Amino acid sequence: MFSIGCGCGVDYYGLDHALRYHPKYAPDLRYTGIDIVRWKYRDTLGRDEVYFVKKDIADWNELDETGYNIIMFPKSIGEFPSKVFTHIKKMLKNSTFERDRICLACSLMDRGKDSDITRFADLARVMTETHGFTTTGKPNEFWHFKKDQGIRGLHSDWIYPNDTLDYIKELARHCPTFEANGESCRPDCDALNRWPILKTGRIAYQALGLQRD
């Protein structure tokens, strides 16, 4: 699996969790995530073939390996400037794919979803026109949950720690300036306070199968 704009590696953690239910595939897992930022909160979860690479994808002319069978964009496909995204398409054109079955996947942003879908279709077109794949679905199709429900109701193993929730709800209060003076240094500091996404309403994603004879 090759993850572009992997962030902290949340897609890898999801994959690792899924393999607990399909352990026969676990020994074959190999993950490479690339991001321009070195995130502090990353974990290989004890696997040897997991790599987080701090590099700019715009510096790559082609993928570093030929055996990837999943190309993933976790909430990142819409974040690249137009010039960089054009380079990503060129990089995929220059790459070699030895697998005849590949999955192209991305998690969509809540805002800008249409633009993300257009970019996803552009990547699918590169794979079909340059590398001879056919699609097993529609490049502009995406999935979301029509009923907004708690994520734990969707998956009972998912738990958001209460102490983390309490911390980020009042993140501005943990600023050294606030702690020293009892108030924020700027009126808009409260914008730092965040609620995590605890329901399914904003979850949207695309997954497209590619195959060739």
Image (cartoon, grey):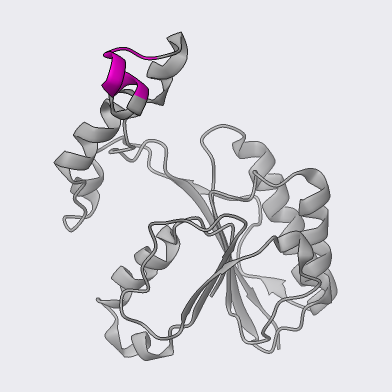
Residue ranking furthest to the front: 180
The overriding secondary structure of the stretch rendered in magenta is helix
> In the figure, residue 97 lies in which quadrant?
bottom right
Please state which of residues 34 and 197 is positioned toward the viewer in this rendering.
34
| Horizontal and vertical percent position of residue 195 | 31, 30
| Horizontal and vertical percent position of residue 59 | 77, 65
Q: Residue 111, relative to residue 136: is it above or below? A: above
> In the figure, residue 176 lies in which quadrant?
top left
User: Can residue 34 be seen at all in this image of the molecule?
Assistant: yes
Split into 4 quadrants, where in the image is the C terminus? bottom right
Please indicate whether residue 172 sits to the left or right of residue 115 in the image: left
Residue drawn at x 69%, y 39% as measured from the top left: 115
Please state which of residues 10 and 115 is positioned toward the viewer in this rendering.
10
User: Can residue 193 be seen at all in this image of the molecule?
Assistant: no
**The residue stretch that appears in magenta:** 177-184
| Horizontal and vertical percent position of residue 186 | 45, 12
Please indicate whether residue 142 sits to the left or right of residue 200 in the image: right
Q: Residue 213, relative to residue 11: is it above or below? A: below
Q: Is residue 188 on the magenta stretch?
A: no
Q: Is residue 179 on the magenta stretch?
A: yes
| Horizontal and vertical percent position of residue 110 | 51, 35
Q: Residue 156, relative to residue 184: is it above or below? A: below
